[in-house]
Image (spheres, rainbow, N blue to C red):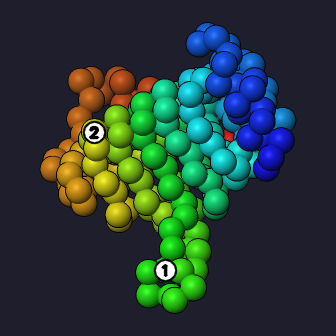
Amino acid sequence: MVIWDLVQQMLIHPSPHPFYGWRRFWYRLFGAQLGRGVLIRKSVRCNYPWNVTIGEHVWIGDEATLYALAAINIGAHAVISQQAYICTGTHDHRDPQFGLIVKPVQIGCGAWIALGALVLPGVTIGEGALIAARAVVTRNAEAWTVYRGSPAVATGPRELRSADAADSLEASSVRGAAHA
């Protein structure tokens, strides 16, 4: 853990913006499973990369946090926007010892976690779901649905402009799942 922290501080965060391959190298060296074409911005924070699996062509934006006390699985073609926080750990507020609770987070293919959104432990974000900016997701999010607010609630379907785009995403998601 200490070595990973040093790598983040000294080799990943100061790296030039377009050095995605450099960052993928370090994440993989520390156990992250990354698909092809993953773009991780230099200011992303990740505490335990060995608990992270990311499908093909995923983008993770500036200052996003992957708090991976348990598994974080991100499907192909998903986007984790800047300052989004994916959290797999919390504490039991009823426990006098304030015991740690960890649960995995699953983010479906083609999902978009927008700017500053918070996804809490144990949540599954369905394929193609959109979590709006600053939303707080406390429960599972259905596929191809838009969620807004705190706590996040469904506000309608997420519809792409063309059926061809959805078919293309679905086909690549199936291919990505086979390679993940």
Q: Are the two marked residues, 2 and 1, in contact with CB atoms closer than 8 angstroms? A: no
Q: For mark 2, give the secondary structure.
A: loop
Decide which of tag 2 and tag 1 comes sooner along the chain.
1
Q: In which quadrant of the rendered image does the C terminus lie?
A: top right
Furthest-left residue in view? 155
Mark sitting on residue 50: none
Q: Quarter of the image holding residue 12?
A: top right
- In this view, 96 is above or below 76: below
- In this view, 83 is above or below 62: below
Which residue, given by chain and number where applicable, does mark 1 sit on?
92
The mark lying in front, picked from 2 and 1, is 1
Whether residue 2 is visible to the viewer of this picture, yes or no, is yes
Q: Say which amino acid is labelled 2.
A: Ala
Count of numbered badges drawn on the protein: 2
User: How busy is the neighbourhood of tag 2: few (under 14 within 10 Å), some, or many (20 plus)?
Assistant: many
Which residue, given by chain and number where applicable, does mark 2 sit on?
133
Q: Quarter of the image holding residue 76?
A: top right
12 vs 131, nearest the viewer? 12
User: How busy is the neighbourhood of tag 1: few (under 14 within 10 Å), some, or many (20 plus)?
Assistant: few
Distance between the alpha carbons at the discs numbered 2 and 1: 27 Å
The x and y percentages for residue 16 are 64, 11
Q: Say which amino acid is labelled 1.
A: Asp
The x and y percentages for residue 43 are 56, 28
Tell me if 162 is positioned left or right of 24 in this view.
Answer: left
- In this view, 78 is above or below 19: below
Tell me if 125 is positioned left or right of 87 in this view.
Answer: left
Please give the name of the residue rendered at 34% of the width and 57% of the height, measured from the top-left corner.
137
